[in-house]
Structures are given as structure tokens and as C-alpha cells.
Amino acid sequence: MDLDHLRYFSAVARHGSFGAAARALRITQPGLTKAVRRLEASLERTLFVRLPRGVALTAEGEALQRHANVIEVQLRDAREEVRALTRGAAGCLKIGAGPSWLSRALPGIVTEMSREYPGLDFRLSGGFDRGLIEALQAGDLDLVVSALPDRSLAGLQSIPLTTDTITVVARRNHPLRAKRRPQPSSTLAYSWALPGRDVLLRQRLEALFRVAGLEPPAAKIESDSISFIAAALRTSDMLSFATSQVLRREMGGVTPLHVPGLVMTRSAGILYRSSAGVTPAMRALIEAIKTHANELGAN
């Protein structure tokens, strides 16, 4: 399979038309069409269907596009690793981090590294685990520091660093604190403020409710901002689910509410793509994070 033909195919898939893809690639439309036809002939499959305006992928085209995306990321990683071997810890390191890591650990680590490696620039993105992992898989990030998924993900390597406890949290004078041993069912009498349903923290909470034979709570307030959720809890009887480290550092006025059956631990650490290897810049950052690991909390 010709890599140029695959690149041309991906451009058409992204732009949804041969004309727009040809302009983006700066080649003629007949030349682009001919290259894609050759790819289809080599695979003995039709990859696009024509629409009144533009084209759409066939089922075979969608399957090829998934693999083409992976190949493009791997080629980009290969180029970057080869270049990094000659220039050392230089270039731009794109880091994704969970809220607690972004606010507490990384500022000091990154500023120290920027002094030690003047040729290295940093681009940091915050978020929750699902979005960060997707950006890492797409090649938009070089490395992620966050909660680790419960199972290994294809194409990703992990370095566990810390463990943390996750519990139900509420304001200090919440009515449930008057109960000696509040049960999971009793928490359903109250509204919940939670991150989005694609966030691992919420998925784990929902799993605990299902183990208890209960339907998980709906989110009265849904937000990816820890500070917003904390503010909502401080001024209401709402509940949430958070790690002990985030609670201590980011959610003043909110404390754990021990509910048997709604307590668990999780691991946090570093994720990077297997295809990328570990460049000198990444190695320097990983070692810096490991050095500070005893002071770090989970995401």
C-alpha cells in the first residue's frame, strides 16, 4: 500500500470532497482522484460514495480511515523521535494533565525544567481522563499525567505513580452526617454535582451503585470544573464524588462523607503512546515527576 495514496485518501475523508482535499494538498484534483482510484484497485474495494455535494466513506473506507489515522500518528512519532535523538531535550513538549496535577505538581516541575532545558518549550492542556487520553491517542499530546484507566489501552504505555481514595463528599454540616452509617440508598435522596458521564471518576461511581443494586444518581449539575462543583456543594445539600487529594487541595469547605459501599481507591500516573517511544524531553519530564511523586496526589 502506497503511503502517499493513503495520505491522499485521508485528506479526502477529512474534507469530504476531492476538490477541497486537492486544494489542501496543493495537487490537482484529477491527480488526487487517480491516486485514490489506484488505492481502491489495490484493495479491490470502493472507499467512497458520491453525494450531491462531496463524498462519504463506505464501511470499508471507514475501516481504512481508522487504520490510516493510527499510521499517521506513528509516522509523526517516528519523525519526532529521530529528530529528538540529534537535538536532545529540545522542541515542544505537549502535556495533558488532570486538574490536581495541573494546578499543584506541574507548575513547579515545568518552570524548573524550562530553566534547565532552555531549548524546550511546553504546551499544557487540562481536562479529565477520557478527553486527555483521546487527545494522546490522536497524537495531539505527547504525554498525559492523570488517573489511569482500569485496563490497559492498546497503543499506550503507563507508569503508575500514586494511589488515592475516592469517596462521597459534601459540605461539613450536611444532613447525612447525622446518620451513623449512611447507606448508598440514602444518598439518592439528594441531588448530585458530577463531571460528565465519559469521565472515569463518574463511571466508577455508577459502577459502585450498580454493585449495590441501585440505579446510579443523575447529575443535577454536570461540570468539568472542580472549583464550580465545590462551590455548589458548599452552598447546598448536594453530593459529589472526589479523591482525597483533590478534596484537600481544591475543595475547601467540603469534606468526605463515609458511605459504606461508595468508597474505592484508584491509581494515577503517566501515559504515553507506545509508538512514540520516550524522547529525551519526555524522559526528563518523567524523571522530574517521579522525583516529586511522593508529594503528588492522584488527579
Image (spheres, grey):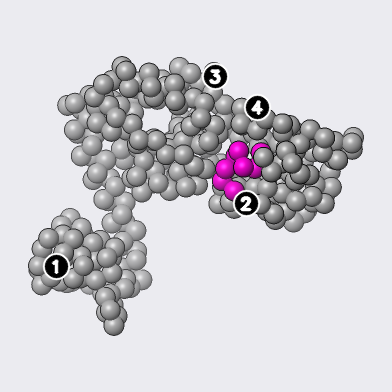
Q: Nearer the viewer, mark 4 or mark 1?
A: 4
Real-space Cα separation, disc 4 to disc 2, in angstroms: 21 Å
Tell me if residue 225 is in the magenta stretch: yes
Residue on which the image places disc 2: 222
Q: Nearer the viewer, mark 3 or mark 4?
A: 4
The amino acid marked with disc number 2 is Glu
> Which of the two discs, 3 and 2, labels the residue nearer the N terminus?
2
Q: Nearer the viewer, mark 1 or mark 2?
A: 2
Image location (x, y in percent) of residue 293: 51, 21
The amino acid marked with disc number 1 is Leu
State yes or no: discs 1 and 2 in contact (Cβ < 8 Å): no
Q: Which SS class for mark 2?
A: strand
Residue on which the image places disc 3: 295
User: Is residue 37 visible to us here?
Assistant: yes
Q: Which SS class for mark 3?
A: helix
> Which of the two discs, 4 and 2, labels the residue nearer the N terminus?
2
Real-space Cα separation, disc 1 to disc 2, in angstroms: 45 Å
Image location (x, y in percent) of residue 54: 26, 75
Q: Which SS class for mark 4?
A: helix
In the rendered image, the quadrant that contains the N terminus is bottom left
Task: Please rate how many residues cluster around mark 1, counting C-alpha atoms within 10 Å: few if below 14, some from 14 to 19, many from 20.
Answer: many
Image location (x, y in percent) of residue 183: 84, 43
Q: Residue at x 72, y 53 (%)?
A: 217
Residue on which the image places disc 1: 32
Q: Where are the magenta residues, as a range?
A: 223-230
